Image (cartoon, helix red, strand yellow):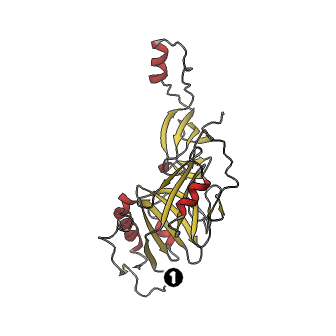
Amino acid sequence: MKSISSLENIYINGKFGNYEKKNENEIIKIKEIKNIFICQIVKFKNSFFDTKNLKIDNLNLPSNLKCTFNSSTRILWMGPENYLVTSNKLELLKDILREFNENDFAVTELSHSRTIIEIEGTNVNEVIKKGSPVNINDLKEGDCFNTIYHGIAITVDFLKDNPKKARIFSLRSFGQSFYHSITDSSLEYGYIVE
Amino acid sequence: MLHIKCPHCGLRSQNEFSYGGDATIKRPELNKEISDKDWDNFVYLRKSPRGKHLELWQHISGCRQWIKVERDTLTHEILKTLKANEEI
């Protein structure tokens, strides 16, 4: 299940839209991120456990609307005491379960249930603005937030500032619809599917 | 478009929120005798004020938390927002 992409039937490599006579950074680069480990960690409402010293892959848990990251793992803030961990280390779950005890935390493996699309280019903010009401002008590298994109619940994680690079998560079942929304919004700037 | 300041996420569009009703309603105490009329009032009876109103909203497309919002029903002005466990 994990290795079968939800975009398998619609994902076509190539250049599309209005890409001619534009420099490389202006064109949106679209890429699907597959085969990474995703896990949700939620602290129970009635738990008094102090999360300050907890670490995942040597990373502290992030504060509101922030993300902590290293080269392989990113921890996103999803809500109060609610985190989403993504990592290239597919065996990370064992370490997480050792650190987060089951009496205080609900740890759920979600690797199979998200579609992740990475978009890069100077016009990334414009593409997100087309479908989302959130004010993203001030957001930068290391910020993350939940919002909606043409009615689809998404999580945006800003990876890089210059040129802008963002990873956008949606539920796997909305993946195809979300991919079409992103590519439609990118037509104006031209996009490359890698 | 209305903008609501979520105490966890900051100023966001109303599109991200879902209305959850009157926030001043208190549930009758547990394990206490209560008349059918009082229970009926708790479940169904709501005021519909013209002016300031304390409401529950859920930031359903954001942090998914329930929050309290003081809103003017006449002007739609959002006067104050609080976490669900805070009192005005």
Q: x and y percent of residue B22 in the render?
A: 52, 31
Q: x and y percent of residue A113 in the render?
A: 41, 58
**A127 relative to A101 in the view: left or right:** left
**Going 54% across and 20% down the picture, which residue do you hit?**
B28
Crowding at dot 1, Cα within 10 Å, few <14 / some 14-19 / many 20+, comes out as some
Q: Nearer the viewer, residue A159 or A124?
A: A159
Question: Where is the C terminus of chain A found, in terms of image quarters?
Answer: bottom left
Say what amino acid the circle numbered 1 marks.
Asn
**Going 39% across and 65% down the picture, which residue do you hit?**
A2
As drawn, B74 above or below A57: above
Q: x and y percent of residue B32 in the render?
A: 55, 15
Is residue B20 visible from the viewing direction of this image?
Answer: yes
Q: Nearer the viewer, residue B27 or A61?
A: A61
User: Which of the 4 quarters of the picture holds residue A18?
Assistant: bottom left
Residue receiving disc 1 = A25
**Going 50% across and 74% down the picture, which residue do you hit?**
A123
As drawn, A53 above or below A182: above
In the displayed orientation, state which residue is furthest to the left: A9
**Going 53% across and 64% down the picture, which residue do you hit?**
A86
Is residue A77 visible from the viewing direction of this image?
Answer: no
Give the tally of numbered discs: 1
Local SS, label 1: loop
Q: x and y percent of residue B67 in the render?
A: 57, 41
> What's the chain of the residue with tag 1?
A
**A186 relative to A104 in the view: left or right:** left
As drawn, A76 above or below A48: below
User: Which of the 4 quarters of the picture holds residue A115?
Assistant: bottom left
